Amino acid sequence: MSNQLDLTFVKRYRNYLLNAELRRNLEEPKKISRNTASSYFKNFVSVLKLAYKRNLIEKNLAEDAEFIKEEETHREYLTEEELAKLWNTPIKIEKVKHMALFSALTGLRFVDIKNLDWKNIYSDKHQGNYILLREQKTQSIKNHPISETAYNILKSQNTTEGLVFGDIEYPQITRPLKLWLEESGINKKISFHNFRHSYATLQLANGTDIYTVSKLLGHKNVSTTQIYTKVLDKNKIEAANRINLKLDGLS
């Protein structure tokens, strides 16, 4: 395999990702998004670096790999008022509501919430409430502080040991989540991951500095977190244009 792995192969794989189709609906073929392709290619390049470091391949192909530039996307988020509205909106599976709001209160990804174990949750009068967390995406271990409200959501579950939210997979939450949002009357395109976006955006909007938010989200680089500041800048521009006066003599 190492003999077949050369720069031509790397370029072909890059081109494949840019044209790859989703297989969810064969009647309506659809390409994967450019940002998804970019993420897959970054992971591939990371593997190339590791392979070279371990002498599995002779040439450092990662050096010559041309990354796929991501497109700037609009990151939808929920306001504090909308989150409160969702809390008061009935849902078929109550656990889904709790997990979603917990994400909005902590910034954790679905997979990290799914794997939350009671043995890693602590409440200390000096350190407050926190989770000893091994992030699934980065595999790093960190002490992740959570608010009293977030801690109360955990305490409201019907479990006292093992997985806090029991055994649940992502496909089980998508439809209940969609129906819940429709029932609330919130007209936004929201997936579970948008609750994490909401946490980041609301932290910045409430004055938390970007470096702290970056650490809380588990970002390796603050540049990743800066995406959320663009959302706030857009909101500021929209807010500025909400007040317009018709003044004589001014065009």
Image: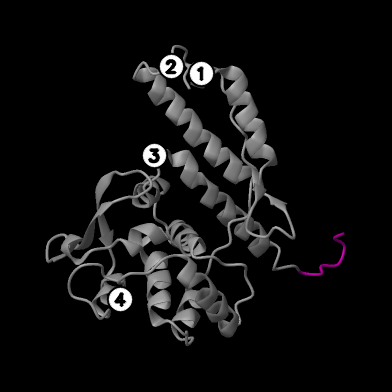
- Quickly name the residue at label 3: 220
Q: Amino acid at mark 2?
A: Ile
Tag 1 and tag 3, C-beta contact below 8 Å: no
Q: Percent from the top left, x then y, of residue 208?
A: 39, 55
Number of numbered tags placed on the structure image: 4
Sequence-wise first label, 2 or 4: 2
Q: Amino acid at mark 3?
A: Lys
Q: Amino acid at mark 1?
A: Leu
Sequence-wise first label, 3 or 4: 4
Between 248 and 67, the residue placed more toward the observer is: 67
Q: Quadrant of residue 54?
A: top left
Mark 3 vs mark 4, CA separation in Å: 28 Å
Q: Quadrant of residue 239?
A: bottom right
Q: Percent from the top left, x then y, of residue 175?
A: 54, 74
Please tell me whether mark 3 sits on a helix, a strand or a loop. Answer: loop
Q: Name which residue lies at 51% across and 74% down.
A: 177
- Looking at the image, residue 227 lies above or below residue 190: above
Q: Percent from the top left, x then y, of residue 96?
A: 42, 75
Between 64 and 189, the residue placed more toward the observer is: 64
Magenta stretch?
Answer: 245-251
- Quickly name the residue at label 2: 57
Please tell me whether mark 1 sits on a helix, a strand or a loop. Answer: helix
- Looking at the image, residue 23 lies above or below residue 19: below
- Quickly name the residue at label 4: 153
- Quickly name the residue at label 1: 61
Tag 2 and tag 1, C-beta contact below 8 Å: yes
> Which one is closest to the eye, mark 2 or mark 3?
2
Between 68 and 215, the residue placed more toward the observer is: 68
Q: Name which residue lies at 62% across and 67% down.
A: 189
In this view, which residue lies farthest toward the top?
A: 58
> Which one is closest to the eye, mark 2 or mark 4?
2
